[in-house]
Image (cartoon, helix red, strand yellow):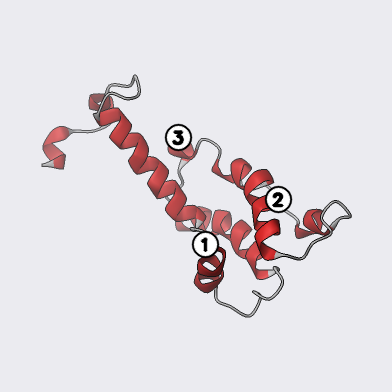
């Protein structure tokens, strides 16, 4: 289930700026942690789920001042951001690295079959 996000929360009197960089910092502070919470555990594989999660960032960046006419990838590049999907992939790879190198106290043999990796 993707949490509902309304851009109007960032148009309230608390946020008097239209500066995309400032609003993106607010998004990264208040919204992204909710969307990213425990992604290593619940990382979706269904394309519909991935699209619905990505739509949160897509809608937000579409409404930013001076960026609405750019494509999604161009908006991310202009803001120096990565898609939520690529962040989930990176988090998963980082977690696998930590498991394989004993940084986290989880036996990787319960999750990965070494013979498939070679």
Cα distance, mark 3 to mark 2? Answer: 21 Å
Cα distance, mark 1 to mark 3? Answer: 26 Å
Viewer-proximal residue among 44 and 56: 56
Residue count near mark 1 (Cα–Cα under 10 Å), binned few <14, some 14–19, many ≥20 = few
- Residue holding disc 1: 80
Q: With respect to residue 102, does 67 lie above or below?
A: below
Residue 117 place in picture, x, y as percent: 15, 41
Residue 16 place in picture, x, y as percent: 84, 59
Cα distance, mark 1 to mark 2? Answer: 24 Å
Viewer-proximal residue among 74 and 110: 74
- Residue holding disc 3: 41
Viewer-proximal residue among 95 and 47: 95
Quadrant in which residue 21 is drawn: bottom right
Residue 75 place in picture, x, y as percent: 56, 70
The quadrant the C terminus occupies is top left
Which of the two marks, 1 or 3, is nearer to us in this view?
Answer: 1
Q: With respect to residue 88, does 11 lie above or below?
A: below
Is 18 on the left or on the right of 76, as rendered?
A: right
Residue 15 place in picture, x, y as percent: 81, 55
The quadrant the N terminus occupies is top right
Q: With respect to residue 38, does 76 lie above or below?
A: below
Is 77 on the left or on the right of 62, as rendered?
A: left
Of pointers 3 and 2, the one earlier in the residue sequence: 2
Which of the two marks, 1 or 2, is nearer to us in this view?
Answer: 1
Is 49 on the left or on the right of 26, as rendered?
A: left
Quadrant in which residue 111 is drawn: top left
Helix, strand or loop at label 2? It is loop
């Amino acid at each position: 289930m993707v949490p509902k996000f309304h851009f109007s929360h960032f148009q309230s009197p608390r946020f008097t700026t239209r500066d995309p960089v400032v609003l993106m910092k607010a998004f990264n502070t208040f919204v992204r942690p909710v969307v990213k919470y425990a992604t290593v555990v619940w990382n979706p594989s269904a394309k519909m789920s991935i699209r619905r999660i990505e739509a949160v960032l897509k809608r937000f960046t579409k409404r930013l001042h001076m960026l609405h006419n750019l494509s999604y990838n161009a908006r991310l590049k202009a803001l120096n951001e990565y898609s939520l999907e690529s962040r989930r992939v990176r988090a998963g790879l980082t977690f696998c690295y930590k498991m394989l190198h004993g940084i986290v106290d989880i036996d990787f043999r319960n999750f990965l079959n070494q013979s498939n990796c070679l």
